């Protein structure tokens, strides 16, 4: 064990040493200015990622990266000054303080404990057991269990956090029953959270994406709304679209590769469970659940709280979005009384003139939501209240058991809360060091129009993977890279600009999907009761494979003039060929292996 730790530590030193030597020699002095970030700004996120892989301790890795980032903000200016080292330590502390005092972060954190407590109560009252018994009538094997998980992930499109917690916790007993590995479950949950929420025209992501596109559209004088630009880019969202296709193709073909193959083989080697031996979620397995173990399952104890959670969330988003639209209209009308017509901004959407059953209506409403984290937190509390009411009315739980559920839920929520705080603190560190701007500036002025979108996708992928934030990557690259694409298009809103929009959005989601310091990745592994590093390690080859398909066979051909539908078709054909070859190779290997 000590020798392995020494080897891992030595590996960290070698990797970081190589980075520190190669990056400065690659960059010119002008590219190391304070406006675009310094070369060592990449050290904290890389340290977190490398340490996480080598030591398999996420908290230690994130903490070490934050401390190193704090030192890098102060020490390089005066490396021999003890005051600089002390100020660096204080800076690291301020990164954490900034995370726990951020209003939006607190709203997201307040969503986690009630969700965990709600799930504890739902499980203890037999709710999940009832759903499991119902699903087992339809799910007859590993493939159908995985397909059901993927479909549930698509159905929960409204928010990536809700998707991860609900789908992971609910489907784990089903996938365990049919010997699907926890790593595979975590991948399916993760692959249908951020990619689906990022594509959905009604989701908690759309407001942020559209606001960035709207701002850059006004700056460039495109003459289109943020929503119009979003739909223009939708045809070029190759990574998200290909990931959805990949999920179902590889389930249908039944072939794994990379570390996931070993994880699946290990899971299949276990003894199959009988129907009455279906375990509860390991995240929730505790003495708390023993009172309900012998009771019949009551699916309504789970369906009512979960439906209440989703309905409350959608209703809250509707109230918030319509209030913003009405406020914008009132402000515009008040401004029109004292402002010349030629100086007036565009008229806001008149929500009262739209039909509530139209897609346009809901796109506008959800797109103008201002307080989605707060709505999500309130929805979690509402779902918890419904879970308590159902448990009491059905007579499933005593008050003493409910108290234990509360304690167990809060206890289990602590690990994801701490990890999220540290991940956000590392993001604050990267913002302070301008890591994202540094990575974006590397490509400035070095590429031609036809190569710009593919390299922009690669840049967004590296940035989001290194920083663990899709929102931050979008905020950095959309205002900085899209104007470059616009200029390469001859100062017109042309093909290069539209592909670049899709490349930034997709590259940002790639990192959010598979980075070990991404909050969605963290929540997917915890909800699926999977070791976090095992989750990252097993899904990374899949994510990289899909990203390579998107880059080489979709973004590059589209940038060269191929229609996006044909580029997508080409990438899917290559994917199918890969799985066919993999299947034939596996069969040939199996036939040649002596029995």
Image: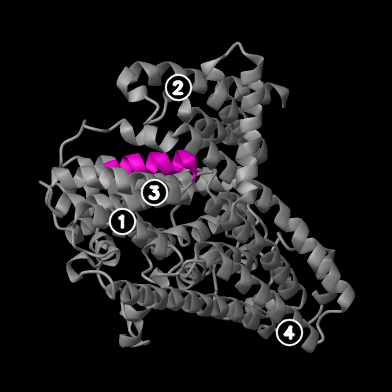
- Mark nearest the camera among 4 and 3 is 3
- The residue carrying mark 2 is 19
Residue at image location 47% in from the left, 29% down from the top: 41
Residue 345 locus on image (x, y percent): 25, 66
Query: Which comes before the other along the chain, label 2 or label 4?
Result: 2
- The residue carrying mark 1 is 215
* Marking on residue 117: none
- The residue carrying mark 4 is 390
Magenta span of residues: 456-468
Residue 314 locus on image (x, y percent): 50, 77
- Mark nearest the camera among 3 and 1 is 1
Front-lying residue, 565 or 358: 358
Residue 527 locus on image (x, y percent): 62, 59
CA gap, disc 3 to disc 1?
A: 11 Å
Secondary structure category for the residue under label 3 = helix
Query: Which comes before the other along the chain, label 4 or label 1?
Result: 1
The question of residue 464 being in magenta is answered with: yes
Query: Which comes before the other along the chain, label 4 or label 3?
Result: 4
Query: Which comes before the other along the chain, label 3 or label 2?
Result: 2
**On-image quarter of the N terminus:** top right
Residue at image location 81% in from the left, 76% down from the top: 292
CA gap, disc 4 to disc 1?
A: 46 Å
Front-lying residue, 582 or 437: 437
Q: Residues within 10 Å of mark 4 (few under 14, many from 20)?
A: many
């Amino acid at each position: 064990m000590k020798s392995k730790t020494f080897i891992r530590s030595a590996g960290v030193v070698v990797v970081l040493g190589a980075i520190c030597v190669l990056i400065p020699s690659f960059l010119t002095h002008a590219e190391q200015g304070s406006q675009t970030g310094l070369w060592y700004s990449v050290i904290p996120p890389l340290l977190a990622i490398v340490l996480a892989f080598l030591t398999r301790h996420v908290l230690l890795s994130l903490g070490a990266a934050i401390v190193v980032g704090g030192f890098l903000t102060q020490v390089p200016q005066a490396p021999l000054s003890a005051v600089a080292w002390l100020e660096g330590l204080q800076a690291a502390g301020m990164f954490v303080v900034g995370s726990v005092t951020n209003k939006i972060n607190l709203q997201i954190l307040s969503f986690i404990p009630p969700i965990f407590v709600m799930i504890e109560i739902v499980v203890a009252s037999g709710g999940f057991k009832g759903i499991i018994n119902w699903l087992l009538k339809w799910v007859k094997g590993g493939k159908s269990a995985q397909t059901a998980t993927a479909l549930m992930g698509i159905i929960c499109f409204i928010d990536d956090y809700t998707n991860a917690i609900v789908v992971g916790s609910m489907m784990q007993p089903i996938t365990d029953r049919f010997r699907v590995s926890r790593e595979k479950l975590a991948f399916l949950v993760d692959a249908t959270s951020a990619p689906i929420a990022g594509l959905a025209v009604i989701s908690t992501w759309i407001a942020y994406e559209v606001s960035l596109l709207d701002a850059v559209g006004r700056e460039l004088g495109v003459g289109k709304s943020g929503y119009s630009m979003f739909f223009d880019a939708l045809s070029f969202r190759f990574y998200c679209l290909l990931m959805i296709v990949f999920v179902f193709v590889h389930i249908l073909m039944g072939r794994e590769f990379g570390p996931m193959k070993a994880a699946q083989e290990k899971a299949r080697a276990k003894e199959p469970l009988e129907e009455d031996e279906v375990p509860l979620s390991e995240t929730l397995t505790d003495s708390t659940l023993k009172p309900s173990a012998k009771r019949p399952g009551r699916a309504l104890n789970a369906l009512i709280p979960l439906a209440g959670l989703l309905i409350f969330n959608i209703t809250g988003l509707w109230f918030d979005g319509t209030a913003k639209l009405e406020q914008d209209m009132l402000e515009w009308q008040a401004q029109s009384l004292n402002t010349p017509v030629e100086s007036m901004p565009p008229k806001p959407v008149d929500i009262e003139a739209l039909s509530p059953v139209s897609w346009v209506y809901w796109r506008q409403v959800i797109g103008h939501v201002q307080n989605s984290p707060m709505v999500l937190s309130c929805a979690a509390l509402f779902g918890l209240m419904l879970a308590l009411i159902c448990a009491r009315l059905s007579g499933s739980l005593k008050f003493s058991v409910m108290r234990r559920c509360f304690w167990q839920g809060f206890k289990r929520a602590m690990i994801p809360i701490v990890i999220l705080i540290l991940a956000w603190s590392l993001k604050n560190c990267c913002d302070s060091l301008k890591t994202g701007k540094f990575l974006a500036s590397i490509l400035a002025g070095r590429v031609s129009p036809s190569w710009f979108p593919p390299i922009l996708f690669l840049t967004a992928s590296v940035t989001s993977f290194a920083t663990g934030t899709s929102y931050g990557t979008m905020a950095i690259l959309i205002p900085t890279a899209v104007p470059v694409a616009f200029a390469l298009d001859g100062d017109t809103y042309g093909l290069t600009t539209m592909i670049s929009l899709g490349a930034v959005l997709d590259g940002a989601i790639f990192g959010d999907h598979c980075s070990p310091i991404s909050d969605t990745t963290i929540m997917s592994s915890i909800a699926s009761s999977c070791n976090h590093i095992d989750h990252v390690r097993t899904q990374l080859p899949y994510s990289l494979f899909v990203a390579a398909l998107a880059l080489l066979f979709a973004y590059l051909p589209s940038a060269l003039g191929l229609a996006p539908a044909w580029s997508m078709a080409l990438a899917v054909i290559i994917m199918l060929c890969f799985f066919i070859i993999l299947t034939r190779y596996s069969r040939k290997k199996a036939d040649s292996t002596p029995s």
